[in-house]
Image (spheres, grey):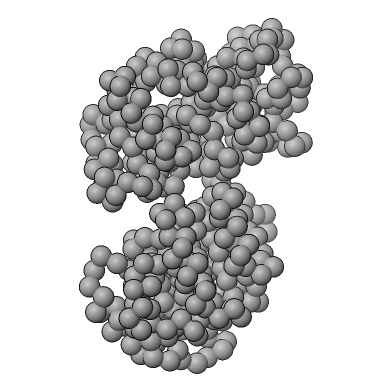
Amino acid sequence: MVNPASDSIATPTFADLGLSAVTLRALADEGYATPTPIQAKAIPHVLAGRDLFGCAQTGTGKTAAFTLPIIERLRAAPGRAAARRCRVLVLAPTRELAAQIHESVRAYGRHAGTTAAVIYGGVSQRPQADALARGVDVLVATPGRLLDLVGQRLVDLRSVECLVLDEADRMLDMGFIHDVRRIVGMLPRDRQTLFFSATLPAEVRELADSMLRDPLEVKTAPQATSAETVTQSVYHVAKQEKKQRLVQLLREEPMSRVIVFTRTKHGADKLHRDLDKAGISAAAIHGNKSQNQRERALAAFKSPRPPVLIATDIAARGIDVDAVSHVVNYELPHEPETYVHRIGRTGRAGQSGTAVSFCDHEERPRLAAIERLIRMRIPAENAPEGIAASTEPQSDRGHDRRPRGGRSGGSGRQQRRGGSGRREGSSRSSERRGTPSAAATPAAAPTTPARPRRSKHRRAL
Ligand code: AMP
């Protein structure tokens, strides 16, 4: 279960959102007391028939955010889908996700009498076609198998009233863009569309723009909790030095289980080759790897002597390993939220973790955007090129490494150190460790005691 609407002050109830008694009963069966933030924001608008553009990852309660109002809308305009047709189509990139959504639709719609079917590849199509034969309210499908069945005239998409596209970024990463466009082309133009993606690369934006009409945009704040258990630092390095720096870091820093993030699949493969050449055991996972290759890499990563795992953001989403000691951001992501997702891979289950980022000259605006989002300055292990290390606490001159935007509070461990009054050494060293100045101290300084910890990486590099 997720943490309900923790970032909202006046938390509405499910009843406040306009859900009917039968749906409320199903939610009570599930044990949900309060809507999550994305549910609170999205449900009333989806109920009113509006398109939605949701930036949210799994774990935020997004499935219920679209399923609950869909169930209500189906009830409000009763009618059965004709044979081989559906009223709502949900597209998901993987069979696991499709099966999960199908299960949720059945659970949330159990008292409303919502009918649902799921189709995905890799298994016999016969039972799936049978389930569809009489028509269903909600069809959950992966794109490839859906197109197969449409081609065989076992599914007809001409009555779809609402389309949900889930994990759009992963769809693109897995190469389903053409399939998705073909499917969308078969649907009535006059429909409601709900579009979800965890990250927002330009291609996702383009796809959304081509499908949505005046959508409500809902962005869920990334879970800030990881920042509290993860020690973060950044190295300012030239692009061409990154490889050598990484090799050095991996050799000299004790890291029991490390994920290295690259932005592209090509970058992941290249780094894999480079680490191989340096004699460092590594494995790569990304969208171009087969399911088998991914599974093998993950199994090795979970073993007692794991290789360094090189991953792209989307591929890494399926990694559920608790004891990751280090995350290395070999390249900083375009989307600041992605940084938070990445570092959330370590410091899990109450353990501490370390996130090290490499930032070259071109990436500095991305670093600034990340710092704005997490509302703290990530401690720099060295001064950026061209900016002399100052013996004074840094001001806003030169490269602005302070969090901006007025609200300079935050939840980083380094800041809590400042909030609890335990500073390390001189103002310079506390500055280098990211302890905020008085002006940057959060309004409500967290009170967790500090754990002084000197950086090991500075020694290593
Ligand atoms: P999702 O992001 O849709 O994958 O949901 C993540 C998990 O949160 C699922 O296990 C849901 O059952 C659960 N969940 C969804 N909404 C709520 C809620 N309002 N309260 C508690 N748990 C929820």
Q: Compared to 174, does 113 lie above or below?
A: below
Q: Compared to 443, does 388 lie above or below?
A: above
Q: Is residue 398 visible?
A: yes
- 62 vs 92, left or right, is right
* Residue at 53% over, 56% down: 197
Q: Is residue 111 visible?
A: no
Report x, y in % for residue 179: 44, 66
Q: Compared to 45, does 451 lie above or below?
A: above
Report x, y in % for residue 213: 66, 70
Q: Nearer the viewer, residue 354 or 283?
A: 283
Q: Compared to 244, does 215 lie above or below?
A: below
Report x, y in % for residue 138: 44, 78
| The N terminus, quarter of image | bottom left
* Residue at 28% over, 51% down: 291
Q: Nearer the viewer, residue 339 or 256?
A: 339
- 92 vs 44, left or right, is left
Report x, y in % for residue 373: 64, 39
Q: Nearer the viewer, residue 365 or 76?
A: 365
